[in-house]
Amino acid sequence: METGELLRVEHLKKYFNTPAGLLHAVDDVSFTLKRGETLGVVGESGCGKSTLGRVILRLHEPTDGKIFFEGYDILGYGKQAMKQARRDMQIIFQDPFASLNPRMTVSETISEALLIQGFYSAWDKEGLRKRSLELMEMVGLAGRLINTYPHELDGGRRQRIGIARALALNPKLIICDEPVSALDVSIQAQILNLMQDLQDELGFTYLFITHDLSVVKHLSDDILVMYLGQMVEKAPAGRLFENPLHPYTQALLSAIPVPDPDFNLARTILKGELTSPIEPVPGCRFAKRCPRVHEGCTGRDIEFTEREAGHFAACTL
Ligand SMILES: Nc1ncnc2c1ncn2[C@@H]1O[C@H](COP(=O)(O)OP(=O)(O)O)[C@@H](O)[C@H]1O
Ligand SMILES: [Mg+2]
């Protein structure tokens, strides 16, 4: 298996023009993702996680910054080169029901990408059927379901189709945008285990987006915490849980429910006004809700600095 860097983003920005002003959805995000690893991207709804994923796939053009995939600057790619690159970069969405075509069977859904990318021709019915069955088996879907439609299946099975579709082209990178958030907790664990097993077997790389830190704890090598478009903390997963440095990360961790009722007393309930992502002023965007805010937190941008090996935070403390 090849090792080394697969994806690198540098100072990535995506601003949207809105009637109220320029909205900073992704504001200076940088990271490197090695082959076979998983980067968890965590933060509340609206912090820019989906936009980050979409910009990396060039479903949105970035406002600024660079994206290198296998060492190549993909922002310089034309249409044809990008189509090729997309084989290697797939996405799994939160709601498979919304992302699956209701009029397509399991095999048609899986075959679609194979046809579009020219892996099979439409007359090779037998080849397509065999490959569909193979992919279904990989994601734990019984072969007898090959001609069923999404509405005939439960949420977990629908997400398995979403995963099979993503795997169809042997991608190198899979961007997972809240892939288990719409599922029952009991099914979440099954899907997460499947995703981990598939990665162990096939060696691809995940960018795993979620609002729920507990979901990425066991899956991630590194975890990146975002707040209103910015990176607030990044660390190896274990270190982030043992030694969270940013008050926002600490609040996220304290919100993970634990069975011990005494532990819940230590929960930080985030209060205060949410800062607007529209034309934000310099300073920590978490300041208005931060329990440890002081004068140094406003009026200037807070640097994202390394505090221990591989552990970065943007905080004045
Ligand atoms: N196409 C768009 N046009 C304008 N604003 C957008 C668009 N897409 C996302 N946003 C805004 O960008 C911010 C980040 O959104 P998003 O990336 O969906 O966050 P998340 O996935 O973390 O919930 C939000 O304030 C959202 O309203
Ligand atoms: Mg999202």
Image: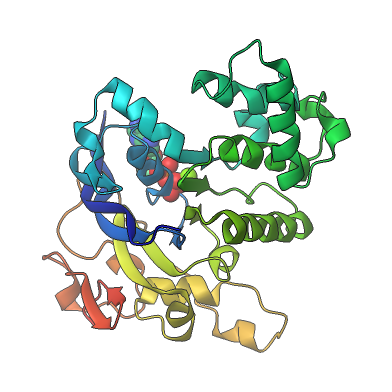
Report the front residue among 269 and 51: 51
Residue 155 occupies quadrant: top right
**Extreme residue in the bottom direction:** 262
Q: Left or right of 227: which side holds 205?
A: right
Report the front residue among 256 and 266: 256
Q: Picture coordinates of residue 233 (x, y %)?
A: 33, 70
At 21% from the left and 79% from the top, the residue drawn is 316
Q: Left or right of 303: which side holds 44?
A: right
Q: Left or right of 87: which side holds 75?
A: left
At 79% from the left and 27% from the top, the residue drawn is 151
Please say whether residue 68 is visible from this viewpoint. yes
Q: Picture coordinates of residue 167 (x, y %)?
A: 58, 41
Q: Picture coordinates of residue 69 (x, y %)?
A: 30, 46
Q: Quadrant of ligand 1?
A: top left
Q: Is residue 120 above or below residue 259?
A: above
Q: Is residue 99 above or below residue 267?
A: above
At 52% from the left and 48% from the top, the residue drawn is 176
Please say whether residue 13 is visible from this viewpoint. no
Q: Is residue 311 above or below residue 221?
A: below
Report the front residue among 185 and 68: 68
